[in-house]
Image (spheres, rainbow, N blue to C red):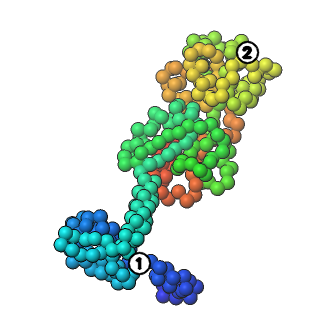
């Protein structure tokens, strides 16, 4: 559409509002010069502060005084003194400029800080070893990590920019990018694994559980081991605690093999059986749609999906 037609349409639709807008707003640059002159007590010092000439400062003050229809300064040999009208205007201008500067600082900070929220086990076992790579990609961004174990992405009333959430990818009001599926199988210490020749041997070993509590019954059923006491054993509120207990030889945990690859590679944990189960759950990177084009979110999305693809 022709730009002239667009502007004409805007004027016809909002003409009165635009007229009011122009009438109510004073010359904004002149207000900045006024505040500088009032703070410094002279036009010459204000000019130095603003990196302009003294004549430019004088012209801006004249413009503002003409707009307001009253003098703002009394000039004398020692400098400037505010008139009664100037004294009324100054605190309002200082407050407005201060609030504007604060809002702009906050907006600049948004691009300089990346707040991520993710499950504790995902953070400790998978994300943390890769964190230096992300920091190298975002050298000017302060990456902040917070952990939680919710299955719902929540961005209202928080400063979180993006989150990693486990689920099926069906959430309203967010963009969800698939990272990797959950792949479950028993894991334990090498010493305990040496006693496990078949899945049936698990019935004689302590089983370590975490929410949801159906992982062990599902895996044993898939392995052909029927046991009504599959839920027996120690229960923890996070997978990280169950894995820590397994590392210490306290039992066998159902672990996500994608998250414990480093421990498996180092021999701290062992997966004694090849059988895995997939409960249809995956890890997703989620964020509000209005943040999708922020540079830090674009870098995070591309890096996370590439890193997950290597898992």
Figure disc tally: 2
From the image, tell me which residue sits under label 2: 203
| Residue under the point 63% across and 34% down | 183
The disc, 2 or 1, on the residue closer to the chain's N-terminal end is 1
For disc 1, the neighbor class at 10 Å (few under 14, some 14 to 19, many from 20) is: some
Furthest-left residue in this view: 77
Furthest-right residue in this view: 228
- Residue 38 position (above or below residue 248): below
Helix, strand, or loop for circle 1? loop
| Residue under the point 74% across and 24% down | 220
Residue 130 position, x and y percent, is 45, 37
Does the rendering let one see residue 29? no
| Residue under the point 50% across and 28% down | 262
Query: 38 left or right of 218?
Result: left
From the image, tell me which residue sits under label 1: 26
- Residue 19 position (above or below residue 93): below
Q: Nearer the viewer, residue 32 or 290?
A: 32
Residue 89 position, x and y percent, is 40, 71
Q: Which mark is residue 190?
A: none
Residue 295 position, x and y percent, is 45, 55
For disc 2, the neighbor class at 10 Å (few under 14, some 14 to 19, many from 20) is: some
Q: Nearer the viewer, residue 127 or 144?
A: 144
């Amino acid at each position: 559409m022709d730009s002239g037609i667009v502007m004409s349409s805007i004027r016809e639709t909002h003409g009165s509002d635009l007229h009011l807008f122009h009438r109510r707003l004073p010359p904004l640059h002149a207000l900045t010069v006024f505040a500088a002159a009032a703070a410094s007590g002279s036009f010459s010092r204000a000019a130095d502060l603003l990196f302009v000439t003294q004549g430019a400062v004088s012209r801006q003050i004249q413009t503002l005084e003409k707009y307001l229809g009253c003098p703002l300064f009394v000039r004398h040999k020692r400098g400037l003194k505010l008139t009664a009208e100037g004294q009324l205007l100054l605190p309002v201008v200082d407050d407005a400029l201060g609030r504007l500067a604060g809002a702009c600082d906050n907006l600049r900070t948004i691009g300089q800080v990346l707040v991520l929220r993710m499950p504790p086990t995902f953070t400790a076992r998978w994300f943390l070893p890769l964190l230096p790579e992300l920091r190298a990609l975002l050298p000017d961004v302060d990456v902040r990590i917070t952990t939680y174990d919710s299955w719902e992405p929540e961005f209202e009333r928080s400063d979180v920019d993006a989150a990693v959430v486990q689920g099926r990818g069906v959430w309203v009001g967010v963009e969800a990018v698939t990272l990797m599926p959950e792949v479950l199988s028993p894991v334990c210490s090498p010493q305990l694994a040496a006693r496990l020749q078949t899945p049936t041997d698990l019935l004689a070993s302590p089983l370590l559980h975490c929410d949801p509590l159906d992982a062990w019954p599902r895996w044993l059923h898939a392995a052909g081991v029927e046991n009504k006491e599959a839920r027996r054993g120690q229960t923890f509120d996070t997978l990280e605690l169950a894995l820590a207990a397994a590392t210490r030889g306290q039992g066998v945990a159902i672990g996500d093999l994608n998250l414990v690859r480093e421990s498996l590679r180092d021999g701290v944990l062992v997966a004694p059986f090849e059988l895995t189960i997939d409960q249809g759950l995956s890890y997703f990177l989620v964020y509000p749609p209005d943040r999708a084009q922020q540079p830090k979110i674009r870098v995070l999305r591309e890096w996370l999906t590439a890193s997950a693809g290597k898992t």
